[in-house]
Each structure stands twice: as C-alpha cells, then as structure tokens.
Amino acid sequence: MMGRDAKGTPLKGLLLGLAFGFLLQKGGVAKFEILIGALLLRDFTVIEVMLSAIAVGMVGVLLLERFFGIPAGSKPTRYAANACGGLVFGAGFALSAYCPGTGAAALGQGNFDALFVLLGLMAGSFVYALLSAPLGRGLERIGDRGGLSLPDLFGISKAATAAGAVILILLVLALLARV
C-alpha cells in the first residue's frame, strides 16, 4: 500500500485472513483427509477450489485494474529463488498435508495436529529470515527476469490472457467432474 494511508491495514489484513480461512474451511480444504487425498490424486476437491479461486481472482484483478484503476502489481520472476521456494513449500506440504492457509484453517476448526505444522512453519520462517540476506542475493541473481508476466511473454493483452486461462480452467474443472 505504498503511497496510501496505511491506517487500518492490520485490521483489514485480519478480516481478509478470517474470510480466507472461513472460505477454506467451508470449501472442505482444511480437512486432513481431503488434503492427503489431493496429494495421492484421489480427491480433487483442493484442485477444484484452487482452480476456481485462480479464475475468480484473475477476473477480479482484471476488473479492478480496468474499472477502478487499481494496478495489478507483480513480483519479479527469479527462476532459482522461485524453484527453491517451490521445493521447500512442496516438501512441507507433502510431509504434513497442510500449507500455511489450510493449516491455520484446520487449527481453527480444532485439528490440533496442524499446530505442529504452524510451529514448524514459524521456525522455518525464522531460519529463512536469518539466512535470506546471504543466500537470497545469490539466488535472486540466477535467472532474474524482472516483472515477467504471461501477457508480456506472449505479447497479448491481459484480458485475452485471463479469458484463455479461465476457459482452460473451466475445461479442467469439467474433466475433473467426470473423474
């Protein structure tokens, strides 16, 4: 929120976090059995919820940018840092069957096994904070592509990219409904 008054930001973050956790829980993706089913490719609930969220999010961001002038920022594309972060995240998810959001939602619904996952996540975040300055600079230089986006990469508009992605997501959702 650079350049804007940041008053109320923690409250807004708390409210959005509560709403996100509520939606995760209502979507059924805070249940250990559902998450394990996703990892074993036996239950596609998580994939369906995530794909739906991506489609709605893409359209929402596009509309906010187009009609309200709220720019959609992007993080830099850094292949090595992105790959390392993805591997660490994936390993944690595979070992625990929880990601940060689903872990918090699971704890909120009384699954106390998620407490250990969240404690491990905080410990890992602390270690990362200690090591990020010396390690991060090296990783950030390997494969740094800047603010690369799909519309930039393919030379097409954001609207066309979103439309294509939403159509692809709808096709995948239709296929998953048949499985």
Image: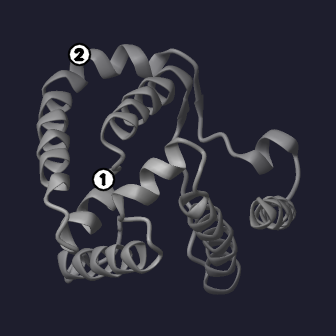
Where is 169 relative to 92, above or below? Answer: below
Give the camera-side residue of 158 and 54.
54
Q: Which residue is mark 1?
A: 100
- Closer to viewer: mark 2 or mark 1: 1
Counting from the top left corner in percent of width and height, residue 168 is at: 84, 59
Where is 10 relative to 146, above or below? Answer: below
Q: Residue at x 57, y 64 (%)?
A: 45
Give the camera-side residue of 83 and 115.
115
Counting from the top left corner in percent of width and height, residue 36 is at: 43, 48
Q: Secondary structure at mark 2?
A: helix
Quarter placement of the C terminus? bottom right
Residue 171: name its quadrant: bottom right
Mark 1 and mark 2 in contact (Cβ < 8 Å)? Answer: no
Where is 102 relative to 36, above or below? Answer: below
The disc label shown at residue 134, or none: 2
Q: Residues within 10 Å of mark 2 (few under 14, many from 20)?
A: few
Q: Secondary structure at mark 1?
A: helix
Q: Residue at x 27, y 57 (%)?
A: 103
Give the camera-side residue of 159 and 28.
28
Q: Amino acid at mark 2?
A: Pro
Left/right placement of residue 33 relative to residue 56 reads left
